[in-house]
Image (spheres, rainbow, N blue to C red):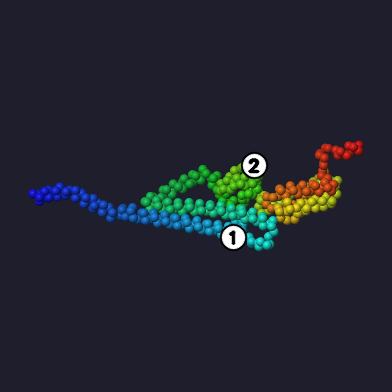
Amino acid sequence: MFNELTLAATEESLPGAETAQQTVETVSNWWDSELARTWLIDAPISIGITLLVAIVAHWILRRLIDKFAQHNLQSSAPLGRLGRKGRAAQPEEVPARVAAMNKVQEKRRQSRVKTLAQVGKSAVAIVVWVFAFLSILDTLGVNIAPLIASAGVIGVALGFGAQSLVKDFLSGIFMLLEDQYGVGDTIDVGEGIIGDVEDISLRLTTIRDIDGTLWYVRNGEILRVGNFSDEYAIARIQVPVGLSNDSTKAWEVIQKATEDACADPTTSKWVLDEPEMKGVSNFEVDHLSYRISIKTMPGMQWDVQRLVQGRILDAMRDNNITVPYPHGIGITHPGSEQES
């Protein structure tokens, strides 16, 4: 009786056993297949290696850019335009005023190096990860040829549609490479926009004019730049003198007043060289005009000009050197009316 029950139970369990065995064989056959090895072993390993190579390449390139930037930031020989290096003068050979000017230029150079380093790292990240992404798609069996072709067509369409944006970025890159101007410089970009540069990006230059207006100028729209603050500036002064004065005496008084003004501690910190008396630059029917040129620190020419002009006017009054129409055009001298 026991044997019969055991035999019956065995016979009832046979279909389930066969099903389990078939399942095991199916799984074993799939595991041993080329498709399983591709998706569970080869593809993950290939993707992992691609990601690892991309991470390492990205890290190495970023480190190289940082090292290059840090080397230039710490270099005692400033990096000039388009890579030219100037000889670093010894501290004891540099006058205080020239040292101050060099400090301003060095600060701008460092800002330019940092900006270029950021641009370089962004470009490296884009290139490395785009190649990694395409390589992963190729590993997964995606045909990337149509994708690349489509990207080319889309790129051309975007190029036509956003060509002004590309122009702005290219202009910004060349502007930084050539060091045309920097933050803090006073520049003229045309269209009556003259002011101090407050910010620079690859697309925009932000300028604050004398009235406090903040201008956002696209780099691609800047066709010419006049930099009033690059390396040094010239304070040019025109002094009108009436024809009734002794021209030699007027020359001496103006020159002496200019030299005294430039030697004053208030002004001397901005003056880089001795003032040059150019002499009579204009000979009009009612006055002479004397021209004076003073080499100053960048951006300080207007301050020097204002201070020197005030000193010259006081000296002319003290020495009875008159300007044309001292009482205004068409106004008779008060003394002539009393005499008549």
**The furthest residue to the left:** 1
Q: Please give the residue where the numbered disc 2 appears in the rendered image.
A: 212
**Residue 280 appears anywhere in the view:** no
Q: Nearer the viewer, residue 338 or 157?
A: 338
Q: Amino acid at mark 2?
A: Gly
Task: Residue 195 in the image: state x and y as whole percent.
Answer: 65, 45
Res 51 → quadrant: bottom left
Q: Position of residue 216 (x, y in %)?
A: 59, 43
- Judged from the image, the secondary structure of the residue bearing numbered disc 1 is loop
What label sits on residue 205 in the rendered view?
none
Residue at left offset 91%, top offset 38%? 339
Nearer to the camera, 201 or 131: 201
Residue 252 in the image: x percent, y percent? 82, 52
Q: Which residue is mark 1?
A: 75
Secondary element type, mark 2: loop
Which image quadrant: the C terminus? top right
Which residue is found at the position 58% from the left and 45% from the top? 218
Residue drawn at 51 percent across, 53 percent down: 121
Q: Name the kind of residue labelled 1 in the image.
A: Ser
> Label 1 to label 2, Cα distance in Å?
37 Å
Q: Classify 10 Å Cα crowding around label 2: few (below 14), some (14-19), many (20 and above).
A: few
Mark 1 surroundings: few (<14), some (14-19) or many (≥20) residues within 10 A:
few
Q: Is residue 27 left or right of residue 6?
A: right
What residue is rendered at 38% in x and 55% in y? 46
Q: Earlier in the sequence, mark 1 or mark 2?
A: 1
